[in-house]
Image (cartoon, rainbow, N blue to C red):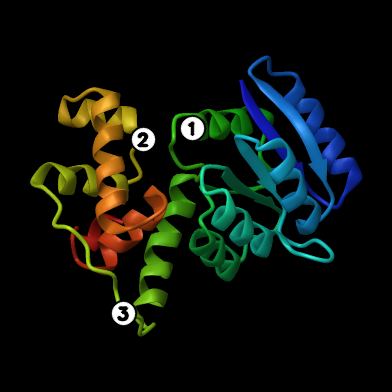
Amino acid sequence: MMRVLLVDDHALFRLGTREQLDSRPDIEVVAEATNGLEAIQAARKHLPDLILMDIHMPHCDGLEATRRIKKEMPQVKIVIFTVADDDQNLFDAIKAGAQGYLLKNLEPSQLYDMLDRISRDEVALSGPIAAKILSEFSQTDSQEEQPAPAVEQLTEREVEVLELVVDGLTNKEIGEALHLSVNTIKIHMRNILDKLHLQNRIQAAVYAVREGLVNEDSV
């Protein structure tokens, strides 16, 4: 059972989304919030597995709420769910630690598929959006002068896994490509994130492209 906190300042959208989520026996909407401040309070109270977070809300927007929740409760997964197809919002969401970025024009079946990905510790992003993020975000970050933390060297197998993450493959697809189990891929991903001091696979893919660990032509 995935416990979901729904955050949006539009009551009709919350109602429609809740009806879709309630139709799934494996999803429970434990609370709703109308702005970022309410989202933080609700997250503290209910400790949801997943937060579907809008961006543009009064008092405290979704990006700021995401930063504060991930800092306080890093185990809570957050997916930005918005109408805004804006590059800077995409980048800021990733920096804040969001596990996905979805647009509200999704079909219900597409939303369910993305939530299933999140439940498997994967990323809720379509291939084209992921490629756009990797391409643009790697160029943006390369212009920032920030000291990089010391990282442990990745093994040859971990680099192979990371290359397939950059290509947008799921854990199951990576396992099939490398003839390994999904659990083994999950272990490799956890080790990669620990070594690179990163929060999720999007950040790992961006890091890999920016630092030249993989061929950027594959993006």
Q: Are marks 2 and 1 in contact (CB under 8 Å)?
A: yes
Q: Which residue is drawn at 53% across and 28% down?
A: 116
Tag 2: amino acid: Thr
* Residue 146 x, y percent position in the rendering: 36, 81
Image quadrant containing the N terminus: top right
Q: Name the residue under label 1.
A: 117
Q: Do the residues labelled 3 and 1 touch (CB within 8 Å)?
A: no
Which of label 3 and label 1 is nearer to you? 3
Label 2 or label 1, whichever comes before in sequence order: 1
Label 3 Cα neighbours within 10 Å, binned few <14 / some 14-19 / many ≥20: few
Label 3 or label 2, whichever comes before in sequence order: 3
Tag 1: amino acid: Arg
Q: Which residue is drawn at 43% across and 38% down?
A: 122
Q: Which residue is drawn at 24% across and 22% down?
A: 181
Dot 1 falls on a residue whose secondary structure is: helix
Q: Mark 2 points at which residue?
A: 170
Query: Separation of disc 3 and disc 2 at Cα?
Result: 31 Å
Q: Name the residue under label 3.
A: 147
Query: Separation of disc 2 and disc 1 at Cα?
Result: 8 Å
